[in-house]
Amino acid sequence: MPSRTDSPLNIAIIGAGLGGLSAAVALRRQGHSVTVYERYDFAGEVGASLSAASNGSRFLEQWGVDIKAAKPVRYPMSWISQY
């Protein structure tokens, strides 16, 4: 079992995707110093999208993300493929 430390850790996260950014938020809320590394520079991006199910949205709200201010788009059920 790893030893527990009360000292903040310096943590590097590789990848600024949803998982990496979520980990960074959670670790910073625990008082750790976090650096996120991403090799893609996003220079050619025109827009961005984040898809989160309702249970994922609950985590965003708990982390203080103002979802209404982000102006979420809700797609009609007819656009969703059912397998």
Image: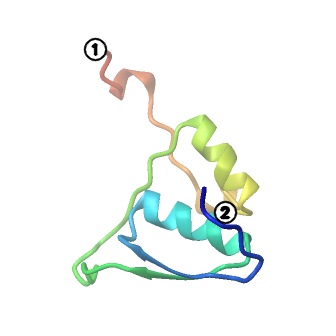
Task: Give the image quarter of residue 83.
Answer: top left
Q: Residue at 45% of width from left, 65% of height from top? A: 20
- Residue 16 marker: none
- Number of residues whose C-alpha sits closer than 10 Å to that of mark 1, classed few (under 14), some (14–19) or many (20 or more): few
- Residue in the image at 62% along x and 36% along y: 55
Gap between marks 1 and 2 measured at Cα: 33 Å
Q: In this view, does 48 lie above or below 32?
A: above
Q: Residue 79: image x %, image y %?
A: 34, 28
- For the N terminus, give its image quadrant: bottom right
The kind of residue on which mark 1 rests is Tyr
Residue 60 relative to residue 82: left or right: right
Element type at marker 1? Answer: loop
Residue 78 percent across, percent down from the top left: 37, 21
State whether residue 50 is above or below residue 79. Answer: below
In the picture of the structure, the residue carrying the numbered disc 2 is: 69
- At numbered mark 2, what does the secondary structure look like: helix, strand or loop? helix
Q: In this view, does 81 lie to the left or right of 27?
A: left
- x, y percent for residue 82: 32, 16
- Circle 2 packing at 10 Å, graded few (<14), some (14-19), many (20+), is few
Residue occupied by mark 1: 83
- The answer to which of 20 and 73 lies nearer the viewer is 20
